[in-house]
Amino acid sequence: MTGTRWRAAILSTLLITAPFTNAPAIGQQEAAAQASVDGIPNHEVLDYAIEWRLVPAGTAKLTWTTMPRPATVANEVRLHMQSAGLVSRLFRVDDDYTAALGENLCAQNSFLAAHEGSRNRETRVSYNSQTKKADYVEKDLNKNSTTVHEVDIPSCVHDVIGGLVVLRTLHLEPGNAVEIPISDGKKFVQVKVESQRREELNTAMGPRQTIRYEVFLFDNVLYKRSGHLHVWLTDDNLRLPVQLQVRLQFAIGTITLKLEKEEKG
């Protein structure tokens, strides 16, 4: 498995996208207005162990920060991913992703610094609610080349990582589903999110009662490849993401993120 595919698969596991409620359908503006960060600490760090085909593959650290007012950026989410063991021997990965979110958790901008094997790339995405455009700029630092994209978006859209926060603020009971807006800067899509069932899950913090969701990002939605993405949130007020899993075709297999530690500030 190449480093690019490994990173894409891991990022896919964290693409838990944006606002939905128990209603069968709601407008994009209404969804954004309903989202809040109530119940989530102003500062939180979640440390995950990554498994690829049941083999330790690396670590992921997800950091959430609510900025003090009157900052222009209301919230910030950071993700650091680092390969280990067999994956590092095949293709070392050391990536940092940062996203700035507005008052309604709408994406403002994001930045990815990707160091994968001999590859070094930086990707910036700017989401403009006034022009309803997302601008994507990727720089290959080794080749000194630039790739640019522009895509139409609604006035409120969610980036691929920040949507996880929105999911935690809402309660979609099993048997309900909704479509939501998401963009990675190259494409804008409506993504179906389905609440499937309650499950007891064994975690590093002991057994937890959870709700399992499926996010339909694959099969020519945001990604062309076939796959399934599931996320387990604790069935309580914290709605802690204790496990995330993506199952792709056989060449890549299954990648699972398991929460090992939670820090609140």
Image (cartoon, grey):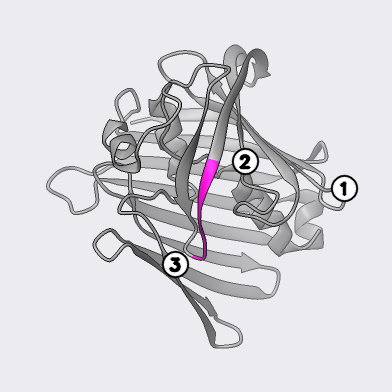
Q: Which residue does the numbered mark 3 point to in the structure image? A: 151
Q: Which residue is mark 1?
A: 250
In x, y percent, where is residue 62? 49, 42
Residue kind at label 1, given as amino acid type: Phe
Query: Is 52 positioned to the left or the right of 214 in the image?
Result: right
Residue hosting label 2: 216
Does the magenta stretch mainly form a helix, a strand or a loop? strand
Say which residue appears at 19% left-offset and 54% top-offset. 72
For the magenta stretch, what is the residue range?
186-191
**Residue 1 as seen in the image, left or right of residue 71:** right
- State how far apart marks 2 and 1 are (Cα): 19 Å
Decide which of 68, 123 is in the foreground and name it: 123
Q: Position of residue 168 (x, y in %)?
A: 43, 28
For marks 1 and 3, the one nearer the N-term is 3
Q: Quadrant where the N terminus lies?
A: bottom right
Give the CA distance from mark 1 to mark 3.
32 Å
Dot label at residue 29: none
The Cα–Cα distance between marks 3 and 2, rounded to whole angstroms, is 21 Å
